[in-house]
Image (spheres, rainbow, N blue to C red):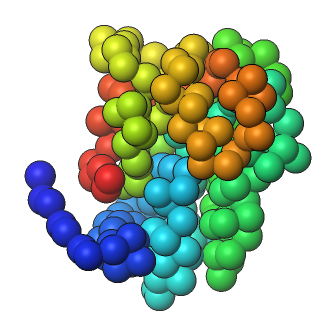
Amino acid sequence: MKIVQQPTRNELGPVAAAHGAQAIRDAVAARGHANVIVATGSSQFEMLDALAREPGVRWDRVALFHLDEYVGLPVTHAASFRLYLWQRFVSRLPVPPAAFHAIDAETDPAAECARLGEVIARHPIDVAFIGIGENAHVAFNDPPADFETERPYLVVTLDEACRRQQQGEGWFPTLADVPTRAISMSVRQIMKSAQVIC
Protein backbone atom coordinates (compact mmCIF):
# COMPACT_ATOMS: atom_id res chain seq x y z
CA MET A 1 0.00 0.00 0.00
CA LYS A 2 1.25 3.44 -0.90
CA ILE A 3 -0.17 6.46 0.92
CA VAL A 4 0.01 9.85 -0.79
CA GLN A 5 -0.96 13.04 1.01
CA GLN A 6 -1.74 16.39 -0.55
CA PRO A 7 -2.94 19.60 1.12
CA THR A 8 -6.23 19.80 -0.82
CA ARG A 9 -8.59 17.79 -3.00
CA ASN A 10 -7.59 20.00 -5.92
CA GLU A 11 -4.03 18.74 -5.59
CA LEU A 12 -4.80 15.12 -4.71
CA GLY A 13 -7.21 14.47 -7.60
CA PRO A 14 -4.61 15.02 -10.34
CA VAL A 15 -2.05 12.88 -8.49
CA ALA A 16 -4.49 9.96 -8.31
CA ALA A 17 -5.44 10.50 -11.95
CA ALA A 18 -1.82 10.53 -13.11
CA HIS A 19 -1.04 7.32 -11.23
CA GLY A 20 -4.09 5.57 -12.66
CA ALA A 21 -3.51 6.90 -16.16
CA GLN A 22 -0.03 5.38 -16.15
CA ALA A 23 -1.49 2.01 -15.14
CA ILE A 24 -3.95 2.30 -18.03
CA ARG A 25 -1.18 3.20 -20.50
CA ASP A 26 0.91 0.27 -19.26
CA ALA A 27 -1.99 -2.18 -19.68
CA VAL A 28 -2.72 -0.95 -23.20
CA ALA A 29 0.97 -1.20 -24.11
CA ALA A 30 1.21 -4.74 -22.71
CA ARG A 31 -2.10 -6.23 -23.89
CA GLY A 32 -3.62 -3.79 -26.35
CA HIS A 33 -6.50 -2.88 -24.01
CA ALA A 34 -7.33 -1.95 -20.42
CA ASN A 35 -10.29 -2.41 -18.09
CA VAL A 36 -11.07 0.31 -15.58
CA ILE A 37 -13.57 0.93 -12.78
CA VAL A 38 -14.55 4.54 -12.07
CA ALA A 39 -16.42 5.85 -9.04
CA THR A 40 -18.90 8.62 -8.44
CA GLY A 41 -19.74 11.08 -5.69
CA SER A 42 -18.37 14.47 -4.79
CA SER A 43 -15.03 12.93 -3.75
CA GLN A 44 -14.33 12.03 -7.39
CA PHE A 45 -14.84 15.44 -9.05
CA GLU A 46 -11.19 16.51 -9.19
CA MET A 47 -9.82 13.07 -10.04
CA LEU A 48 -12.23 12.43 -12.91
CA ASP A 49 -11.63 15.89 -14.34
CA ALA A 50 -7.87 15.32 -14.31
CA LEU A 51 -8.14 11.75 -15.62
CA ALA A 52 -10.15 12.86 -18.65
CA ARG A 53 -7.35 15.33 -19.48
CA GLU A 54 -4.43 12.91 -19.00
CA PRO A 55 -2.36 12.84 -22.22
CA GLY A 56 -1.57 9.70 -24.14
CA VAL A 57 -4.36 7.48 -22.82
CA ARG A 58 -5.86 5.31 -25.58
CA TRP A 59 -9.45 5.56 -24.35
CA ASP A 60 -10.61 3.77 -27.49
CA ARG A 61 -8.87 0.71 -26.02
CA VAL A 62 -10.39 1.04 -22.54
CA ALA A 63 -13.52 -0.68 -21.21
CA LEU A 64 -15.13 1.24 -18.36
CA PHE A 65 -17.18 -0.12 -15.48
CA HIS A 66 -18.70 1.68 -12.53
CA LEU A 67 -19.34 0.64 -8.97
CA ASP A 68 -23.00 1.13 -8.25
CA GLU A 69 -26.38 2.58 -9.15
CA TYR A 70 -29.68 3.19 -7.37
CA VAL A 71 -32.36 0.60 -8.15
CA GLY A 72 -35.18 2.13 -10.18
CA LEU A 73 -33.62 5.58 -10.56
CA PRO A 74 -34.04 6.88 -14.13
CA VAL A 75 -30.85 7.71 -16.02
CA THR A 76 -32.28 11.23 -16.44
CA HIS A 77 -32.37 11.84 -12.66
CA ALA A 78 -29.69 14.27 -11.45
CA ALA A 79 -28.43 11.68 -8.93
CA SER A 80 -28.07 8.86 -11.48
CA PHE A 81 -24.50 7.58 -11.47
CA ARG A 82 -24.80 6.73 -15.16
CA LEU A 83 -25.68 10.36 -15.86
CA TYR A 84 -22.95 11.59 -13.51
CA LEU A 85 -20.28 9.53 -15.27
CA TRP A 86 -21.53 10.48 -18.72
CA GLN A 87 -21.52 14.20 -17.92
CA ARG A 88 -18.39 14.37 -15.74
CA PHE A 89 -16.18 11.84 -17.48
CA VAL A 90 -17.22 9.79 -20.54
CA SER A 91 -18.40 12.76 -22.62
CA ARG A 92 -15.22 14.68 -21.75
CA LEU A 93 -12.81 12.07 -23.06
CA PRO A 94 -10.98 13.04 -26.26
CA VAL A 95 -12.33 9.86 -27.93
CA PRO A 96 -15.12 7.51 -26.86
CA PRO A 97 -14.05 4.54 -24.71
CA ALA A 98 -14.03 1.06 -26.22
CA ALA A 99 -17.03 0.31 -23.98
CA PHE A 100 -18.91 1.79 -21.05
CA HIS A 101 -20.57 -1.05 -19.15
CA ALA A 102 -23.12 1.04 -17.28
CA ILE A 103 -25.36 -0.45 -14.62
CA ASP A 104 -28.94 -0.35 -15.83
CA ALA A 105 -30.83 -0.23 -12.54
CA GLU A 106 -34.12 0.50 -14.30
CA THR A 107 -34.41 -3.14 -15.31
CA ASP A 108 -34.75 -6.28 -13.18
CA PRO A 109 -31.97 -5.92 -10.56
CA ALA A 110 -31.15 -9.63 -10.26
CA ALA A 111 -30.96 -10.04 -14.03
CA GLU A 112 -28.76 -6.95 -14.32
CA CYS A 113 -26.40 -8.28 -11.64
CA ALA A 114 -26.12 -11.54 -13.56
CA ARG A 115 -25.52 -9.74 -16.87
CA LEU A 116 -22.82 -7.51 -15.41
CA GLY A 117 -21.20 -10.46 -13.66
CA GLU A 118 -20.80 -12.23 -16.99
CA VAL A 119 -19.35 -9.12 -18.62
CA ILE A 120 -16.82 -8.29 -15.90
CA ALA A 121 -15.68 -11.94 -15.77
CA ARG A 122 -14.33 -11.39 -19.30
CA HIS A 123 -12.61 -8.12 -18.34
CA PRO A 124 -10.00 -8.47 -15.58
CA ILE A 125 -9.69 -5.01 -14.05
CA ASP A 126 -6.39 -3.18 -14.38
CA VAL A 127 -7.23 -0.23 -12.16
CA ALA A 128 -10.17 0.62 -9.92
CA PHE A 129 -10.72 4.21 -8.84
CA ILE A 130 -12.85 4.08 -5.69
CA GLY A 131 -13.85 6.21 -2.74
CA ILE A 132 -14.83 5.47 0.84
CA GLY A 133 -18.13 6.85 2.11
CA GLU A 134 -18.73 8.66 5.37
CA ASN A 135 -19.99 5.44 6.97
CA ALA A 136 -17.00 3.55 5.48
CA HIS A 137 -18.98 2.12 2.57
CA VAL A 138 -17.05 0.98 -0.49
CA ALA A 139 -19.26 1.18 -3.56
CA PHE A 140 -22.65 0.70 -1.86
CA ASN A 141 -21.39 -2.04 0.44
CA ASP A 142 -22.46 -0.49 3.74
CA PRO A 143 -21.04 -1.89 6.99
CA PRO A 144 -21.34 -4.71 7.77
CA ALA A 145 -20.71 -5.63 4.13
CA ASP A 146 -20.75 -9.16 2.75
CA PHE A 147 -17.05 -9.88 2.23
CA GLU A 148 -17.65 -13.54 1.43
CA THR A 149 -19.93 -13.36 -1.60
CA GLU A 150 -18.44 -14.58 -4.85
CA ARG A 151 -21.00 -12.60 -6.84
CA PRO A 152 -19.43 -9.68 -8.74
CA TYR A 153 -22.58 -7.55 -8.37
CA LEU A 154 -25.38 -7.71 -5.82
CA VAL A 155 -28.49 -5.87 -4.76
CA VAL A 156 -27.93 -4.11 -1.43
CA THR A 157 -30.05 -2.19 1.04
CA LEU A 158 -28.63 1.24 1.81
CA ASP A 159 -28.35 2.09 5.49
CA GLU A 160 -29.52 5.42 6.85
CA ALA A 161 -25.99 6.85 7.26
CA CYS A 162 -25.27 6.21 3.59
CA ARG A 163 -28.59 7.68 2.55
CA ARG A 164 -27.98 10.76 4.72
CA GLN A 165 -24.63 11.27 2.97
CA GLN A 166 -26.35 11.23 -0.43
CA GLN A 167 -28.88 13.79 0.73
CA GLY A 168 -26.21 15.86 2.51
CA GLU A 169 -24.13 16.09 -0.66
CA GLY A 170 -27.15 17.56 -2.43
CA TRP A 171 -28.05 14.65 -4.71
CA PHE A 172 -31.56 14.41 -3.23
CA PRO A 173 -33.74 17.10 -1.60
CA THR A 174 -34.86 14.95 1.36
CA LEU A 175 -33.89 11.67 2.98
CA ALA A 176 -37.21 10.21 1.86
CA ASP A 177 -36.19 10.84 -1.76
CA VAL A 178 -33.00 8.74 -1.48
CA PRO A 179 -33.59 5.21 -2.78
CA THR A 180 -33.23 2.40 -0.27
CA ARG A 181 -31.75 -0.20 -2.65
CA ALA A 182 -28.90 -0.24 -5.13
CA ILE A 183 -26.92 -2.52 -7.39
CA SER A 184 -23.34 -2.58 -6.14
CA MET A 185 -20.11 -4.19 -7.20
CA SER A 186 -19.02 -6.52 -4.40
CA VAL A 187 -15.97 -5.86 -2.24
CA ARG A 188 -14.41 -9.11 -3.42
CA GLN A 189 -14.83 -8.08 -7.08
CA ILE A 190 -13.27 -4.67 -6.43
CA MET A 191 -10.30 -6.31 -4.70
CA LYS A 192 -9.62 -8.49 -7.75
CA SER A 193 -8.39 -5.32 -9.49
CA ALA A 194 -4.67 -5.22 -10.27
CA GLN A 195 -4.54 -1.73 -8.71
CA VAL A 196 -6.99 0.08 -6.44
CA ILE A 197 -6.70 3.86 -6.14
CA CYS A 198 -8.73 5.38 -3.36
**Residue 64, position in %: x, y?**
57, 53
Looking at this rendering, what residue extends furthest in the bottom direction? 55
> Of residues 166 and 16, which is closer to you in this image?
166
**Residue 89, position in %: x, y?**
63, 66
Give above or below for 33 relative to 70: below
Does 134 sit left or right of 115 as displayed?
Answer: left
Residue 99, quarter of picture: bottom right
Does 14 sit left or right of 194 as displayed?
Answer: right
> Of residues 77 and 116, which is closer to you in this image?
77
> Of residues 40 and 148, which is closer to you in this image?
40
Q: Residue at x 37, y 42 (%)?
A: 132
Would you say residue 15 is visible in this rendering?
yes
Does 185 sit left or right of 166 as displayed?
Answer: left
Give above or below for 170 relative to 191: below
Would you say residue 36 is visible in this rendering?
no
**Residue 10, position in %: x, y?**
41, 77
Q: Residue at x 77, y 40 (%)?
A: 173
Give above or below for 195 relative to 139: below
